[in-house]
Amino acid sequence: MNLKNAVDGGPSQAALDASGLAKAYVQGQTRVPVLEHVDLRIRAGELVAMVGRSGSGKSTLLHVLAGLDEADKGRVLIRGEDMTAADVNGRAAIRNRNLGFVYQMHHLLPEFTAEENVAMPLRLGGQPASVAGSAAQVMLEAVGLAHRTTHRPAELSGGERQRVAVARALVARPALILADEPTGNLDRDNAAHVLELMRNLCREQGIGILIATHDSAVTQGVDRVVSLEGGRLSG
Ligand SMILES: Nc1ncnc2c1ncn2[C@@H]1O[C@H](COP(=O)(O)OP(=O)(O)OP(=O)(O)O)[C@@H](O)[C@H]1O
Ligand SMILES: [Mg+2]
């Protein structure tokens, strides 16, 4: 019995439903097409990996799906909410309600401790500091960083920062998690641990997860692998 699905009206409600996405970057006279026509649906509780050579557009696609960047064409629904129809504030609100994002470059806030960074989505969601802080501690423990909660990003290693960023994306149990190379800076044991944590949350909480990765350990442990090539997804 998946409570989240029960609350949401059943597993038919996709965590992500993207269709007909196209995007080109324009630099002066040059147009760089990156996404030609991308369709992607991720069910609640489904774990999907996205592969593709460097420069194929994986980060671009994740940013478009998260409403951090705009597509030229197409539509993105996050748990039924139309990201592409919303303005900047609307997109931020949809993100806060539904989405956890792990950036390729971790994007932690430098002046805040690990615990404060992880607590941030809950604080933005209106949780009191004590509740958010406790949840952040639990999440940091889950990624093996119970001993680093008061460190600021500059006082953490690259892999530790990445694990803090993963903890921050997971802490609010969002409907959808988009993760850009979340194991890129991790050794094999820590990568396996982070993937296991994401897989458990996916199964137990019905979270849809999309991971852009070059890591074969990730692609072997997911439900489905899609490949981005020539601006299109296959698989
Ligand atoms: N702001 C931008 N302006 C112009 N071109 C861009 C911009 N951002 C990315 N690109 C180009 O778009 C293409 C896709 O970049 P993107 O970062 O999405 O690739 P990626 O698949 O994530 O690569 P990697 O595996 O190296 O992270 C690349 O050719 C890149 O040079
Ligand atoms: Mg990238």
Image: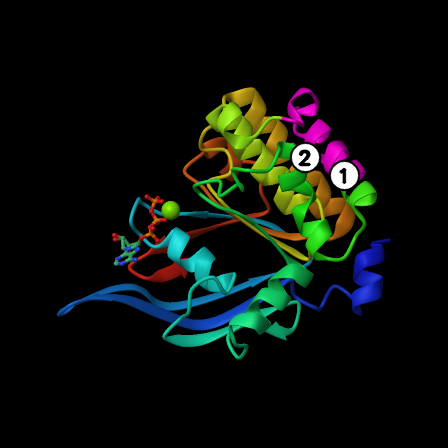
Left or right relative to 27: residue 111 = right
Residue 88 appears in view: yes
Question: Looking at the image, do the residues carrying marks 2 and 1 touch, with CB atoms under 8 Å apart?
Answer: yes
Q: Which amino acid does label 2 sit on?
A: Glu
Give the residue displayed 59% in from the left and 73% down from the top.
90
Residue of label 2 = 115
Q: Where is residue 78 shown, x and y percent of the image?
A: 61, 67
Tell me: residue 94, above or below residue 121. Answer: below
Comparing 179 with 127, the one in front is 127
Q: Residues within 10 Å of mark 1 (few under 14, many from 20)?
A: many
Left or right relative to 23: residue 162 = right
Q: Is residue 221 magenta?
A: no
Q: Where is residue 125 shown, x and y percent of the image?
A: 73, 57
Of the numbered discs 2 and 1, the one sitting upstream in the chain is 2
Q: Does the magenta stretch include residue 143?
A: yes
Q: How crowded is mark 2: few (under 14 residues within 10 Å), some or many (20 or more)?
A: many
